[in-house]
Image: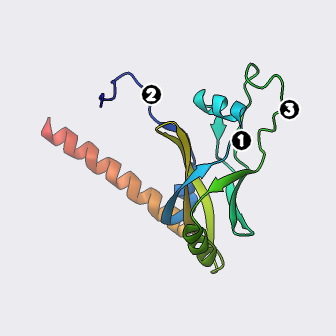
């Protein structure tokens, strides 16, 4: 096996940075993604956004809604490309049943956290989450600032 070269880009395509601020992440799942050819080419170019995306569970299947994959002008000349089309998530039946059971509880929802490459496949990391209250968001921000300040103090004292 060859080692990863230092100049190669990371395998992450898109992140949902807003998710950690808005929700308490309880459980994570890795799902495959059913894509068209032009979408894969756009993902290789890094043209994806998960800002307002969410997971819909219907008829024992999981669907990714609201994910925006910008079509490349060179890749989608012969097809009418819909950047926000509904894409199927590939999960095991037991995983879908577990997610459906949790989502039916009050306050739980399922959102995508990241799109990334795993070997030559595109994977979507989805999570079961519970919404944060305003005071939770402030406490998280306060803790993050304190940790940053601690690191700064430690760095100054060591030098």
N-term-proximal mark, 3 vs 1:
1
- Residue where numbered disc 3 is placed: 80
Figure quadrant of residue 111 = bottom right
Q: Residue at x 53, y 68 (%)?
A: 135
The answer for how far apart the CA atoms under marks 2 and 3 are is: 30 Å
Please determine whether, in this image, residue 155 is positioned above or below residue 28.
above
**Quadrant of the drawing holding the C terminus:** top left
Q: Residue furthest left?
A: 158
- Residue where numbered disc 2 is placed: 9
Q: Rate crowding at label 3 as few (under 14), some (14 to 19) or many (20 or more) other CA atoms within 10 Å.
A: few
Does residue 88 appear in the picture of this structure? yes
Q: Residue at x 44, y 33 (%)?
A: 10
Q: Residue at x 29, y 31 (%)?
A: 1
Q: SS for tag 1?
A: strand
Q: SS for tag 2?
A: loop
Q: Locate residue 113, reporting x and y percent.
A: 55, 52
Figure quadrant of residue 140 = bottom left
Does residue 133 appear in the picture of this structure? no
């Amino acid at each position: 096996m060859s080692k990863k070269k230092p100049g190669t880009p990371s395998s992450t395509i898109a992140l949902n940075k807003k998710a950690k601020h808005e929700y308490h992440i309880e459980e994570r799942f890795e799902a495959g993604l059913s894509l068209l050819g032009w979408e894969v080419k756009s993902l290789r170019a890094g043209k994806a956004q998960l800002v307002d995306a969410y997971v819909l569970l219907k008829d024992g299947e999981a669907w990714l809604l609201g994910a925006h994959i910008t079509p490349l002008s060179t890749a989608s000349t012969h097809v009418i490309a819909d950047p926000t089309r509904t894409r199927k998530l590939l999960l095991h039946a037991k995983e879908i049943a577990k997610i459906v059971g949790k989502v039916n509880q009050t306050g739980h929802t399922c959102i995508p956290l990241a799109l990334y490459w795993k070997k030559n496949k595109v994977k979507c990391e989805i999570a079961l989450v519970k919404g944060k209250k305003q005071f939770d968001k402030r406490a998280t921000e306060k803790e993050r600032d304190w940790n940053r300040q601690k690191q700064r103090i430690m760095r100054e004292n060591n030098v």
